[in-house]
Image (cartoon, rainbow, N blue to C red):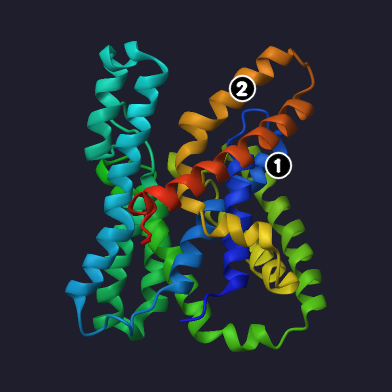
Amino acid sequence: MKRDKEIDIARGIGTLLVTLGHSMYINKYFKEWIYSFHMPLFFFISGYLFNYDKYKDNYKLFLKKKIKSFIIPYILLALFIWFILFLFDYKFILTEEAKNRFIGIFIGFRLSKYYFCLWFVLVLFFIENIFYFLIKYLKRYLYCIAIFMFTISYFEFKYINGFIYSIDLIPISLFFFITGYLFKRDFYKFSCKINKYLKLCLSFIFLVIGYCFAHLNSVYHGLINIYDCNIGNPIYYFVAAFSGVFCVYLFSYGIRKCNILEDLGKNTLIIYAFQNPIVFPIAYYFIDCLSLHSKNINFLISIILALPLLRLIAYLIDKYIPVMSGKSK
């Protein structure tokens, strides 16, 4: 099947925004906007790309594919990164933190000391398997299920903060996954009829709306982030999240081609995996050596240093250990 370049661009924008958002020097207001929709965007895109017909008569093959795409890369990447941290500091392996992080690889208890990295990979594995059966047996009720998932997420977050394998995030993630699938199924043909210049104008309008609601939500509820089980006001969150999603979607289909963003979109997993534990600490070390006092300049330098290094890591893994990124040679 022909690869959708526009969706690669959208995923590339999401990858870039995640990287920007993880820099410790990012502007507060920019971070509020990014965090209001960056993970909903990835789940939306995953639902958009979901292909049930390919596996509808063979769940065993579907499960095998998802284990290869999610579980094996998750375990290999987490162990590899944990080992690299040991190489940077041989005393690391003797610490309580190292032991807890190692345990965290296998139980993934987010928001506790028993967590390491890549929570969203586990969540994607679970929701794709759940959605397979929703499509098979409850296809006509997907809109109702999506509304139900969003509703229970709001109440769930009041009482649950983190759980093993991040299963507490399944409802909110499944909500965005289902909406991505439904948008592709029911509105894709309509969206294709929109002139590319109108798409870019609408993208800007959604950007403004999303930023306003993200900031308003953050003013009253702090930084909005589903990782922390914080969506704040559900109406503000809903508007900000989908404004961000459609801002990126319309912009991607408006420009239609951008090799750099397409490339980032094809290497999302590796770029996400290595930036916080490995690459940004290296960038911060060089920034500290420069002793600059401008947060904006430090932010720019951290991104300029991080992105090429992350892309190099992705290239090396794709070339020599593709199984780590869920790909085949």
Q: Is residue 89 visible?
A: yes
Q: Dividing the image into 4 quarters, which one contains the C terminus?
A: bottom left
Q: Position of residue 14 (x, y in %)?
A: 59, 54
Q: Is residue 242 visible?
A: no
Q: Are marks 2 and 1 in contact (CB under 8 Å)?
A: no
Horizontal side of residue 223 vs 318, given as left or right: right
Q: Amino acid at mark 1?
A: Phe
Q: Nearer the viewer, mark 2 or mark 1?
A: 2
| Residue 84 position by quadrant | top left
Label 1 SS: helix
Q: 205 or 56: which is nearer to us?
A: 56
- Circle 1 is placed at which residue position? 30
Q: Position of residue 281 (x, y in %)?
A: 54, 24
Residue at image coords 50%, 59%: 42
Q: 87 or 288: which is nearer to us?
A: 87
| Residue 123 position by quadrant | bottom left
